[in-house]
Amino acid sequence: MNLVLIGFTSCGKSAVGKVIAHRLNYQFLDLDLEIIQLDKHKRSCREIFIQDGEDAFRKLEAQALQNCSSLTKTVLSTGGGTPLCIANHSLLNTIGKIVWINASAKTLFDRMKIKKGLPAFLQNNPTVEYLQEILNQRTPIYKQLANSCINTDLLTIEEVADKILAEFNFIS
């Protein structure tokens, strides 16, 4: 069984995914890195999004996701916007069990500032309140797709991994 991790940017998908993959001796794939490999200029996802626009980025994302559809023993960390495209829903469900890694807007905002900087979509309004608006739009989509939801606000990466492994009866 594969695991697919969805959730907002900076919620911890990649960090948790790497821990789970290591414990299960699974392959870990970050969809963002797969997108970069498909880009002829090998630009970052942020650069593709800013330079080519969201539509072009989403096309590469859909292609990268399609390339992951036949994988086995894999933990896949998706981009925060991957579930926004309805066409991706059936692929995500085909790939594996979907876990929504959730966090509050304040937690996400703080993590973004510390780790990678604010994403392009927050550049014009870099506030927790605006992030909460976007999170409110995405939450129903994440909730609809997920087989499970884990909130990371008060948990370590290891604790989140423990909860996911226990929920799906994996032995780590």
Image: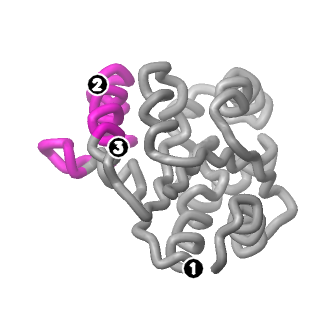
Question: As rendered, which of 142 and 130 lies closer to the eye?
Answer: 142
CA gap, disc 1 and disc 3: 22 Å
- Please say if 42 is above or below 60: below
Q: Give the CA distance from mark 2 to mark 3.
A: 20 Å
Locate residue 6 relative to residue 76 in the image: left or right.
right
Asked if 165 appears above or below 63 in the picture, the reply is below
| Numbered circles on residues, count | 3
Element class at badge 2: helix
Foreground mark, 2 or 3, reads 3
Query: What colour scheme has been applied to the protein in the rendered image?
Result: one colour
Mark earlier in primary sequence (2, 1): 1
Stretch of the chain drawn in magenta: 37-66
Expressed as whole percent of the image width and height from the top left, the position of residue 78 reads 48, 46
Instruction: Report the front residue among 143 and 24.
Output: 24
| Front-lying residue, 61 or 146 | 146
Residue tagged by mark 1?
23
**Does the residue at mark 1 contact the one at mark 3 (Cβ under 8 Å)?**
no
Secondary element at tag 1: helix
Task: Please tell me which of labels 1 and 3 falls first in the chain.
Answer: 1
- Residue 43 screen position, x and y as percent: 25, 47
Q: Is residue 100 left or right of residue 5?
A: right
Q: Which residue is mark 2?
A: 56
Pair 2/1: label in front: 1
Q: Quadrant of residue 143?
A: top right
Disc number for residue 69: 3
Picture disc at residue 96: none
